[in-house]
Amino acid sequence: MAVDKDKYLQIKEELSEKNITLVAVSKSKPITDILELYESGHRDFGENYVQELLEKQSHLPQDIRWHFIGHLQTNKVKFIAPFVHLIHVADSFKLCKEINKQGEKNNRSINVLLQVHIAQEETKFGLNEEELKQLMYQLEINRSSLQHISVQGLMGMASFTDDHEQVRKEFRFLKNLFDEYKQLQTTNCNLQTLSMGMSSDYKIAIEEGTTMVRIGSLLFGERRG
Ligand SMILES: *Cc1c(COP(=O)(O)O)cnc(C)c1O
């Protein structure tokens, strides 16, 4: 199935007023689909597997801004470090240190979001409120040795549920954390991006103050499996 251009334009319209960034989640979709959106002027794409991202990145225009949104193992950071635009899923100090190390090797600073666990489901990755606080603290006290990582904001995924009030509650919780940490002026944290909202819940995320949505199936059609 090809790209739904009308849907794309409609979503862009919905986001433009509030200056919200659209990450087109192209995981499991072919390069031809990505190129179709690229030709329409789109540049931000999201992938969740390192191997798949590398494969696509090598075949596609170099000015695409690649967002990494899947679980990231420490030993895989080196593969995406040369080019990744934003890693949405930093959720441990160990991972942050490795991202910094690979940033240094590549002579760049790598942008990350800290992933916060906001859903009811147990299986998802991310930090709870206390862990987020600790990680922020560790990043701050080690800032002089972390010059190649730049914490740009927070990311979260709401529960998979039809209960809109539950989803809204989770987004609101994350937005409050974001606003709280945004006030802190620290050297390698400059919170400006709040990544929340997917195909099923991006409208709620807009109402709750998102600055970046990650949308796959609405643009590219349902994924198999
Ligand atoms: C797959 C995925 C998305 C997009 O999901 P859709 O429901 O297809 O919009 C967004 N964020 C993350 C982290 C994902 O893994």
Image (spheres, rainbow, N blue to C red):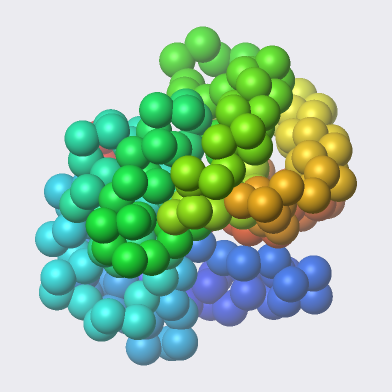
Quadrant of the image occupied by residue 156: top right
Quarter holding the N terminus is: bottom left
Q: Does any portion of residue 170 appear in the rendered image? A: yes
Q: Is residue 18 shown above or below 199?
A: below
Residue furthest toward the front?
A: 144
Residue 28 pos. (x, y %): 24, 51
Q: Which residue extends farthest top? A: 122
Q: Is residue 132 visible?
A: no
Residue drawn at x 33%, y 56% as measured from the top left: 104
Q: What residue sits 86% from the left and 46% below the top?
A: 183
Q: Report x, y in % for residue 3.
A: 37, 71
Quarter of the rendering containing residue 163: top right
Query: Along the line of sight, which residue is nearer the eye, 219 or 16?
Result: 16
* Residue 54 drawn above or below residue 182: below
Does 159 sit left or right of 183 as displayed? left
Is 148 in front, or is 35? 148
Q: Picture coordinates of residue 170 (x, y %)?
A: 74, 28
Q: Is residue 184 above or below residue 36?
A: above
- Horizontal side of residue 213 vs 221, given as left or right: right
Left or right: 27 in relation to 194: left
Q: Quadrant of the C terminus?
A: top left
Q: Is residue 223 left or right of residue 85?
A: left
Number of numbered labels in the structure image:
0
Q: Residue at x 27, y 80 (%)?
A: 62
In the image, is residue 16 above or below residue 160? below
Residue at the (46%, 79%) spot, across then down: 42
The spot of residue 180 in percent (x, y) is 85, 38
